[in-house]
Image: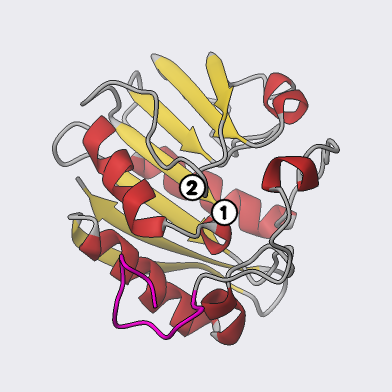
Amino acid sequence: MSDELPELPDGAFAKQDEGDDLAFYAPRRLVTHIDEGAVAALTARYRSLLPEGGRVLDLMSSWVSHLPDDRRYAELVGHGMNAGELAANPRLDRWFVQNLNRDPALPLADGAFDAALCCVGAQYLQQPVSVFVEVRRVLVPNAPFIVSFSNRCFPTKAVAIWRSLDTAGHAALVRLYLERAGFGQVAVEVLADGRSGDPLVAVIGRA
């Protein structure tokens, strides 16, 4: 049973591969985990939601952040599990590597950001509420936290409850994470329906 979400079954956040996450993500994977249509839909949503000139946290990032090329932000801070991938991301102003499953506390100041992103990463979190509480702490009031996901994952590293659910279940689970962490105005948006490519769903909460 999860201490964060006691209503969930025992083993909800277990993984098939309980080995060291940093070792698993050590090889650089300079690939995108969603197709071009899903990327375009996500970029369009970022364009409408992220404040131009704002400070943005890209949680569980990689070598690409899917931000609109025609927008500039005061600062983009990336977090991830692979230093080489983060160093290859041209949009990041600075970045840090941290295993959030071992230490969910972000080394960032309160109210340091105007928006936060988490693209195709929520399925790997074993302490999701603790991580999301930290995200809320580093956001200014009413700032958006955009959590997006598709139907792809590394199955051995995704938590058990994620593997057991369909897309609607994933959306309900992420909504639960956000609400339990204190986010408000939580909304689920289907950005790509999957009929002609990868599906993509965003669950958006406000700090």
**Separation of residues labelled 2 and 1 (CA atoms):** 6 Å
Is 92 included in the stretch rendered in magenta? no
Query: Please, what secondary structure does the residue beneath circle 2 have?
Result: strand
In the picture provided, is 69 more to the left or to the right than 27? left
The residue at 27%/22% (across/down) is 112
Between 135 and 6, the residue placed more toward the observer is: 6
Residue on which disc 1 sits: 121
The residue at 39%/74% (across/down) is 173
Given the image, on which type of amino acid does mark 1 rest? Gly
Would you place residue 48 above or below residue 13 in this image? Answer: above
In the picture provided, is 128 more to the left or to the right than 199? left
Extent of the magenta region: 1-12
Q: Can you see residue 72?
A: no
In the picture provided, is 2 more to the left or to the right than 64? left
The residue at 33%/35% (across/down) is 115
Count of labels shown?
A: 2
